[in-house]
Amino acid sequence: APGSPPPPLFSTPEAQRSAGRSVFLAAMGDTEGGCPLQLVQLNMKEKKVEVNEEALGHLEKRLKKHGAQKMAVVSVMGAFRTGKSFLLDLFLRYLRHEQKAAGEGQFAGTTERPSAPERGGDATYPVPDWLTAAGAIIEGGGDNADGFRFKGGMDHCTEGIWVWSEPFLRQIKGEKVALLLMDTQGAWDSQMTKEQSATIFGLTALISSKQIYNISMQIQEDKVENLAYFMNFAQAALRSVDQAAGDGKKTEKPFQTLDFLVRDWANFEEEWTVAQCKRQMKQHLDKHCDPTRVVENSTAELLHTMFRRIGCFCLPHPGLKIQKAAWTGNVTDIDSDFVRFMDEYVHEVFTEALEPKSIIGSDLSTITFPLVVRKFVEVFQNAAPAAMSFTQAMTSATVLLAKEQVMKSYNSKMSDFAKKHPQGVEPEEFMKLNRSISQEVKDQFQSVTILGSDSTRAEAWTEIEENLNTLFSRFKEDNDRALEKALVAFGNYALIGLVLFVLDRASDWTCDWWSQTCRDLSKFMLFIYMIVGAYVGYHVYLLVNSRGRLAALTASTELWKEMVRLMGVYIDHAKTLDFKEVQDLAQKGIKELRARLNSLPASGGESKKNK
């Protein structure tokens, strides 16, 4: 399979950090299409796991910009020279094509695949649109930097966890989700210890909703045992949590999906259909991971205890041309049978077999993702996994997610109430509402799974209460302002009434004493501003009865302020008007009115004559 030789490690921690910054700056310069960012770095010299805060901050901004609430993370791990980068570049092609078909800023759904000839016949499998729409050269195969294998970056990276800087918007089972592609570098490489590899695997398993273990030729016992090293710590941690709970219930499986992706599989018969090939994939998985069939089944049982779903997919060899160092990434060089199975696999990975990321039953959101990453890295910072570190990681994550759920629920309920009562409610009623909603979210908090003791849950609720009090203070201030502005909604009416009153008083001195038309208009204005005054006065009366004279005086003051503001707005609009056009329009209207008035006596005379 295609791949690059393992890069030499940086000689000093300073060189490692410098390289991480240079890759981050490269990504910042290519935000439109995205490029790899190193989120987590394994410092080999000091044996520490570190977060690249600049890269994580950049990713956090991109997640907020896209507006999705939930997340899904597809990660690929495996040793060097197993075609990992080639696979990720094909994933990028597929996701970009889906995103473009859905439209910019839209959530891509499941696209229907066109019918294709069945495997085993003479017909050649047609190249799918997603593979060729962006051009004949795969992004990471040439000299460009538009894929996971960009030169000058990933070829000189440190071990750790990389992620594509641009999330893809997907609709998964009716839910809008931001999808991240993740690449795990260096795990089970010859230059890393078993503990360091397990740390990288553990962090990836905790963060991912689907973890793809990319291996060559076939599943082997050592490949499964690699996973078991970390799984033992995870199982011990969950066992201690269940014993501490003492209620007889078992904690939900901590990890979601593990896929064994076997590359360069050479056992498919030429005449087999895809369905027959998939049966062989299932048989191969059962041979190594089914506890009822594996002789030494402790590892197989452990994997099924930790993961909710375990699958296997086998890809044939992509072709001899792909192996050559001079290959430029031309899709026409890829073997047709590989294209068929790759098309099958990308649809499986990114549609029916993908779920939003959740941790012990709580969905991971785009807001909490950066916080969870920092917490996980913090507890694994010594690059050596242990049951205690796993427990700390899961406890921190479940507490963070529980806090977010409660805060979002409280904020949503209070915001909905405020929208329904734009003029505010009485302080006593508002306090009663707060107590009711606080009790509701507390009941919700009690039903959320949190790994840890009762004291952990109590400490979490204490912190949540402090945050709720802060949030309540903001809503209370908004309600108080709404009460003060209880009459502001009548600003336009009051301003119209005031203008008509001034015009009526002015007409008393200018034209009422000599013009009947002016007197008629004056009566009309009197009628209008009396109705407006009565309407506003009635609401002032209600306000005095319900909240007292001081509240009514405050609201009346805010009403006057609103009228002054509106007057300024209308004056500014008036300045932009072309008064010549207004004057012409007025003259035209006056002429038409005079013509109609002049025609009235003649019409009356004709009617009398007819009679």
Image (cartoon, grey):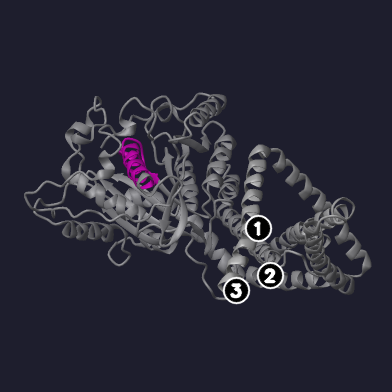
Earlier along the polypeptide chain: callout 3 or callout 1?
Answer: 3
Q: Which residue is mark 1?
A: 597
Q: Nearer the viewer, residue 213 or 301?
A: 213
Q: Splitting the image into 4 quarters, where does residue 362 fall?
A: bottom right
- In the figure, 353 relative to 318: above or below? below
Q: What distance separates the C-alpha of mark 1 from that of mark 2?
A: 74 Å
In the drawing, what numbered circle is on residue 246? 3
Name the spot of residue 395 as percent of width and height, x first.
60, 58
Image quarter of the N terminus:
top left
Q: What kind of secondary structure does the magenta stretch mostly adopt?
A: helix
Per the rendered image, the range of residues in magenta is 76-99
Image quarter of the C terminus:
bottom right
Q: Disc 1 vs disc 2: which is toward the camera? A: 1
Indicate left or right for 255 with 387 as reference. left
Q: Secondary structure at mark 2?
A: helix
In the drawing, what numbered circle is on residue 392? none
**Seen from this angle, which residue lies furthest right?**
549
Earlier along the polypeptide chain: callout 3 or callout 2?
Answer: 3
Q: Which residue is mark 2?
A: 442
Q: Secondary structure at mark 3?
A: loop
Name the spot of residue 391 as percent of width and height, x first.
58, 57
- In the figure, 99 relative to 38: above or below? below
Q: Disc 3 vs disc 1: which is toward the camera? A: 1
Q: Nearer the viewer, residue 385 or 37?
A: 37
Q: Residue at x 66, y 65 (%)?
A: 416
Earlier along the polypeptide chain: callout 1 or callout 2?
Answer: 2
Name the spot of residue 219 as percent of width and height, x first.
28, 50
Q: What distance separates the C-alpha of mark 3 from that of mark 1?
A: 95 Å
